[in-house]
Image (cartoon, rainbow, N blue to C red):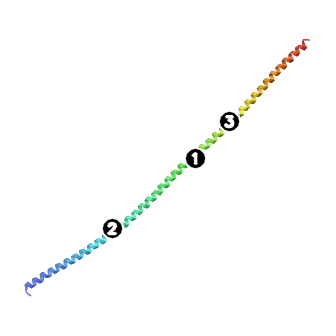
Amino acid sequence: MDSTTLILVGIAGLVIGFIIAKFMEKGKASKTLANAKKDAASIVKEAKIEGESIKKDKIFQAKEKFLELKAEHEKVIINKDKKIAEAEKRTRDKESQISSELARGKKLNEQLQNKIKDLTQKEDYYDKKHTELEKLHKNLVQQLEVFSGL
């Protein structure tokens, strides 16, 4: 082989090697790109799963907090209702006590009025009797005067 042929074969070998290297590099780049896409899809899938998990956890925490606040609110309402019921009971008790005292006062007043009426009637009766007694006394004195003047 002559040197030209050898150079041509060398150049052809180089060109063929270069082309083969380019194809191999392109295949490797395709594989790397495909792997990168797979990794990216996997990362996105994991991120979505983790996001859903975090979302569910946060929703659960929010529901727990809501139930806690609701229970606390119900306790406050129950305490207020209890205080109101106690105040109403005290008011009813006081009203009952006042009504009882008022009824007792009315009864005492009626008894007093009846006693005053009785005393007034007795006084009138005694005044009448006293007047009659004085008349009888005068009559007796006159009769005694008539008998003694004889």
In 3D space, how far apart are the residues under numbered discs 2 and 3 (Cα atoms)?
A: 90 Å
Kind of element beneath mark 2: helix
Reading the image, the residue beneath label 1 is 86
Q: Residues within 10 Å of mark 3 (few under 14, many from 20)?
A: few
Asked which quadrant contains residue 4, the reply is bottom left
Q: Nearer the viewer, residue 32 or 141?
A: 141
Query: Is residue 2 toward the left or the right of residue 54 in the image?
Result: left
Residue 7, x across and y down, in percent: 10, 82
Q: Residues within 10 Å of mark 1 (few under 14, many from 20)?
A: few
- In the rendering, which numbered label is found on residue 44? 2
Q: Amino acid at mark 3?
A: Lys
Asked which quadrant contains residue 142, the reply is top right
Q: Residue at x 12, y 82 (%)?
A: 10
Residue 80, x across and y down, in percent: 53, 48
What number of labels is visible?
Answer: 3
Mark 3 or 1: in front is 3
Q: Amino acid at mark 1?
A: Glu
In 3D space, how far apart are the residues under numbered discs 3 and 1 (Cα atoms)?
A: 30 Å
Asked which quadrant contains residue 118, the reply is top right
Reading the image, the residue beneath label 3 is 106
In contact (CB < 8 Å): disc 2 and disc 3? no
Kind of element beneath mark 3: helix
Q: Residue at x 89, y 13 (%)?
A: 146
Q: Residues within 10 Å of mark 2 (few under 14, many from 20)?
A: few
Residue 13, x across and y down, in percent: 14, 82
In the rendered view, tell whether residue 137 sits above or below residue 99: above
